[in-house]
Image (cartoon, rainbow, N blue to C red):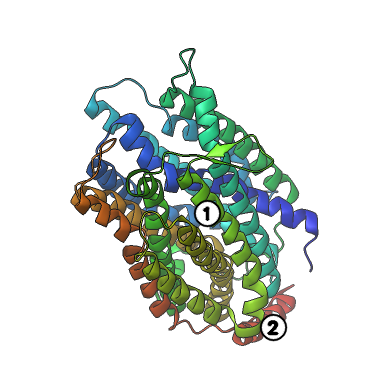
Amino acid sequence: MKIQFGEKVAYGFGDFASSMFWKLFSAYLLYFYTDVVGITAAAVGTMFLVTRIWDTAFDPLVGIVSDRVHTRWGKFRPFILWFAVPFGIIGILTFSAPELSYQGKITYAYITYTLMMMIYSLINVPYASLMGVMSADTRERTTLSTYRFVFAFAGSILVLGTAEPLVTWFGRGTDNVVNEQQGWFYTIVCFAVLASLMFFVTFLKTRERIKPPQERNNKLKSDFADLMNNKQWFILLGAGVATLIFNSIRDGSAIFYFKYFVAYSDRVKLPLLDVSLQYSSLYLVIGQAANIIGVLLAKPISDKIGKRNTFATAMLLAALFSMIFYTLDRDQLLLMFVLQCMISICAGSIFPLLWAMYADIADYSEWKTGRRATGLIFSSSSMSQKLGWSLGGALTGWILSAYGFEANSIQSDYAESGLKMMMSIFPAIGAFFSFGIILFYQLSDHKMHRINDDLQTKRTMLK
């Protein structure tokens, strides 16, 4: 069955909402904790790792639960309804900075960030799983994934293009001095309200069409055994983790790179808009726009050469472009933005492929075992996202500390060299790992067409 345009857009709204906060976390949260709240980079890096390890383990639990939910709305859509409002509320609390002792600030950050990531899992794992039951057509899933990530990067662009001006506007006092704590709080309130409303639209306008096999064994032990014996799942998990390390180090380093290495105080006035941005924000906005180009290119290219080959080529090019980035000096802004476009096009093409391939793995598992655990398998995609982000975020904080970074100070030459490495060589290592791992993936599009034909025959016989 072909999914209508309106339903594809409604599905995309869900990742528009999620990605607003994902981008806030990846691009601004480390800066918020170090430069606004006053926590050291090393402490934040450790917090990111500790909280996200638990959060990574939490994702499969959400997948297990959602696989066993049965309501008149389906298995996965109810979670989007139930957690839309809590998502917004905890998001606001995460970007709040109450007046506490230094240890109190760290404790508050641990609690709110842990809760935020748990709520994120409770809404995002079922949301991702939803794609696996909206259609059985592998190409239709790639189309759905394309819509999803076009809206995801659009949400990121909205955040990156408006966060800084909104913080300035909400935080400006009568003396014209900007109170960043106040500015961030009210800015996040705006994003939280919008995210909750968009989740409601996703719930209302999407439908679940694929039902699990009637004879399915619902034992948790069987589901885990199937997953542990699925080599293709492990391969995609590894490639996904490496990809997210690549992305999270680049995103988390950008604001520091431009503030402390490029060190341009000028702002860029956007044409036709009464908005000016710092170079770091413009760099990230351009990256998100280029990501959308990559998303749009993913389907036509993968239709010709396959999802695995498209994935591998994109990561190899991203690694090579990242290494070239290291050669740039602080005054070569044009080349920085050109390379950002090239790297981001490559990175953008990965994400619709990655999630469409997880849907293929769910079909592959059902074809092999006769049991379907869509939520558990898709939770692994979220798990890889969180694990890669965890390692990348922790590495970002630790590397900053290792190179002697000090917030709101002039950096040493050694620290500046670290900032250059964090925007180039370190991400390139992650991209090279992703490229190497994905070469072992064996579920070609041709093979998946044969598997889907077999599954359709089996499902028809069971009716």
Toward the viewer: 109 or 182? 182
- Percent of width and height locating residue 76: 61, 53
Query: Which residue, given by chain and number where applicable, does mark 1 sit on?
Result: 125
The answer to whether residue 68 is visible is no
Up/down of 314 relative to 348, above or below: below
Q: Quadrant of the N terminus?
A: bottom right
Where in the figure is residue 164, as x and y percent of width and height?
Answer: 51, 36
Could you say whether the residue bearing mark 2 is in a helix, strand or loop?
A: helix
Is 460 left, or right, of 216 in this rendering? Answer: right
Q: Nearer the viewer, residue 401 or 353?
A: 401
Residue closer to the observer: 197 or 56: 197
Callout 1: helix, strand or loop?
helix
- Residue 395 image point, x, y percent: 28, 55
Q: Quadrant of residue 272?
A: top right
Mark 1 neighbour density, 10 Å: few (under 14) some (14–19) many (20 or more): many
Location of the C terminus (image quadrant) = bottom right
Q: Which residue: 60% across, 86% down?
A: 447
In this figure, which residue is indicated by the disc labeled 2?
Answer: 453
Check the image and report above or below for 451 versus 62. Answer: below
Residue depicted at 53% across the width and 37% down the height: 163
Circle 1: residue type: Val
Q: Position of residue 286 (x, y in %)?
A: 55, 54
